Image: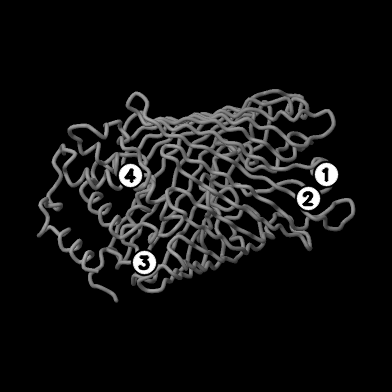
């Protein structure tokens, strides 16, 4: 106890040789408190001794940009650790150092794309159990997208040789966030979503999210969230949102328990919320557990019972059982997620229900490196979803793996193939898919990123005389962060159709898809005028 008291006393500005409240100079030496703290945090959370812009650890001086780049890399690791193990998984002393550095380096941090993408999450983590600085936050966010396609039907995401079309699509979300106390949060979001172009038109307006979340005061041990809400877990392979289009929410209740700093247990139950479920109706109940072993190693397990479908038949349901493991080794991050499915599904011949026996999953690797002074990311992955001849023939999908269309990057940017259950062309169905992924991205400038990905699709079950070779999708994206709250994305994708489409439709035409997207968020905060205890 004495050592703790001494440490606290001598870490205050009054007893410190260096005044940590003084604004940082343009350059600092390795002996400066800011670099010493960054170096210590970097080693602790597995960040390379070199800063992301290649300033060597043994350099004589570091610019504010160097410091911000190092802090950005540390924040990525800290956010990952907090999301899986809770905020308490990061010691209070580390939060104090990170918060102090963040305060000094806010300006150069906001120029970095990686920080911008997670800014709200990062700033909430600094003091989530303290009295919120703002009692009320309101604003509007969303995107506007113009898109066009060739040999493709956009509304159905279907192969259509000789057809070309374009449309304008919008998603606008006004929101209000209210924090009357540190243990009560009220979240309201409306949504307007639709598109128009040619003969296409859709316009929907309704409540997207509306929930109340209560926590035990001063602790993260227990919380309860009730109302319309997104349910997003892991890499969104099984359960997540579909933010490229209209999203996905549930009218649900979620109980979160944290018996240990590293252990999080969620129990949830609810039903698909219309009109944002895209015609799917039914219930979802289950649980999700996560344990953080430290140093980037996390193990997650989950189980769900899902009755959601567009055409539900009596007695049908799907049980989903999965494990997800992630580990980091310096610049290398690995992930694997096997999933098994059981339950009951209709057999169209017998009229009864067959037992479901399907499986799938994915494995991914991400490697980050500095090349020619630029931050590069390299990605490789493999995904598998079982298929069955009965599903090809339209008899029973008992052996066909199913996962919802979410924000997972595994299936590509075009949304032509939305999940691992398969793909249709003409009157033919390919059941179950294997996907081989390769990708690369580079930060061309502080606010400019280029990325490309290649995904090859191969079917597990097809009809007689039909090839399993589905095709190759190539995606190219340029992202420009105009400001903290405004981004512009330009993309071009091409799907080189495989022999499956020639066998199924008689056409080998390739699919083209291009888009221009403007993403925005405007908000205003009303500061708290008095403390609420």
For the residue labelled by badge 2, is the local secondary structure a helix, a strand or a loop?
loop
Disc 3 and disc 2: Cα gap in Å? 46 Å
Give the labeled residue for mark 2.
398
- The answer to the question of whether label 2 and label 4 lie on touching residues, with beta carbons closer than 8 A, is no
Disc 2 and disc 4: Cα gap in Å? 49 Å
User: Reading the chain from its start, which is encountered first: label 2 or label 4?
Assistant: 4
- The answer to the question of whether label 1 and label 2 lie on touching residues, with beta carbons closer than 8 A, is yes
Give the labeled residue for mark 1.
390
Rendering coords of residue 119 (x, y %): 35, 49
Rendering coords of residue 17 (x, y %): 10, 52
> Crowdedness of circle 2 by 10 Å Cα count: few (<14), some, many (20+)?
many
Q: Given this view, does label 3 or label 2 mark the residue nearer the observer?
A: 2
For the residue labelled by badge 4, is the local secondary structure a helix, a strand or a loop?
helix
Horizontally, residue 277 falls left or right of residue 365, namely right
Give the labeled residue for mark 3.
178
For the residue labelled by badge 3, is the local secondary structure a helix, a strand or a loop?
strand
Q: Nearer the viewer, residue 524 or 430?
A: 430
Rendering coords of residue 404 (x, y %): 63, 49
Reply above or below: 96 against 399. below
Give the labeled residue for mark 4.
43
The C terminus is located in which quarter? bottom left
Q: Residue at x 51, y 67 (%)?
A: 227
> Crowdedness of circle 4 by 10 Å Cα count: few (<14), some, many (20+)?
few
Q: Which mark, residue 264?
A: none
The answer to which quarter of the image holds residue 343 is bottom right
């Amino acid at each position: 106890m004495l050592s703790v008291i001494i440490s606290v006393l001598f870490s205050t500005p009054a007893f410190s040789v260096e005044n940590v409240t003084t604004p940082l100079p343009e350059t600092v030496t390795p002996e400066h408190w800011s670099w010493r703290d960054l170096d210590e945090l970097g080693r602790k959370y597995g960040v390379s001794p070199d800063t992301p812009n290649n300033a060597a650890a043994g350099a004589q001086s570091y610019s504010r940009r160097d410091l911000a780049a190092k802090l950005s890399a540390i924040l990525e690791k800290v956010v990952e650790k907090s999301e899986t193990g809770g905020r308490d998984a990061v010691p209070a002393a580390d939060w104090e150092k990170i918060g102090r550095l963040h305060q000094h380096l806010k300006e150069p941090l906001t120029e970095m794309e990686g920080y911008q993408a997670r800014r709200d999450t990062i700033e909430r983590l600094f003091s989530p159990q303290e009295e919120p600085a703002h009692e009320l936050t309101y604003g509007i966010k969303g995107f506007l997208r113009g898109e066009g396609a060739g040999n493709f039907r956009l509304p159905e995401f279907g192969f259509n040789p000789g057809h070309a079309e374009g449309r304008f699509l919008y998603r606008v979300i006004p929101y209000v966030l209210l924090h009357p106390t540190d243990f009560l949060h009220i979240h309201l979001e409306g949504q307007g979503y639709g598109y128009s172009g040619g003969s296409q038109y859709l316009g929907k307006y309704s409540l997207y999210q509306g929930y109340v979340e209560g926590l035990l005061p001063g602790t993260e041990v227990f919380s309860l969230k009730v109302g319309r809400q997104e349910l997003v877990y892991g890499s969104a392979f099984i359960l997540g949102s579909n933010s490229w289009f209209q999203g996905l929410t549930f009218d649900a209740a979620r109980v979160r328990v944290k018996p240990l700093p590293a252990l999080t247990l969620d129990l949830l139950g609810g039903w698909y919320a219309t009109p944002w479920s895209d015609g799917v109706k039914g219930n979802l109940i289950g649980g999700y557990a996560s344990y953080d072993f430290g140093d980037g190693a996390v193990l997650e397990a989950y189980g769900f019972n899902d009755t959601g479908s567009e055409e539900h038949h009596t007695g049908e349901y799907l049980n989903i059982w999965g494990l997800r493991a992630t580990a980091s080794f310096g610049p290398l991050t690995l992930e694997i997620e096997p999933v098994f499915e059981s339950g009951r599904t209709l057999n169209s011949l017998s009229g009864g229900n067959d037992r479901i026996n399907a499986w799938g999953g994915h494995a991914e690797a991400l490697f980050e490196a500095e090349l020619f002074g630029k931050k590069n990311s390299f990605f490789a992955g493999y995904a598998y979803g079982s298929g069955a001849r009965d599903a090809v023939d339209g008899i029973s999908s008992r052996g066909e793996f199913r996962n919802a269309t979410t924000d997972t990057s595994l299936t590509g940017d075009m949304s032509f193939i939305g999940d691992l259950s398969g793909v249709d062309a003409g009157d033919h169905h390919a059941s179950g898919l294997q996907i081989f992924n390769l990708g690369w991205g580079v930060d061309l400038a502080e606010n400019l990123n280029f990325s490309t990905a290649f995904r090859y699709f191969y079917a597990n079950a097809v009809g007689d005389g039909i090839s399993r070779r589905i095709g190759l999708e190539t995606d190219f994206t340029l992202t420009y962060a105009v400001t903290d709250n405004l981004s512009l994305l330009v993309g071009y994708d091409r799907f080189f159709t495989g022999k499956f489409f020639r066998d199924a439709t008689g056409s080998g035409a390739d699919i083209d898809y291009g888009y221009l997207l403007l993403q925005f968020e405007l908000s205003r905060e009303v500061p708290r005028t008095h403390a609420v205890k």
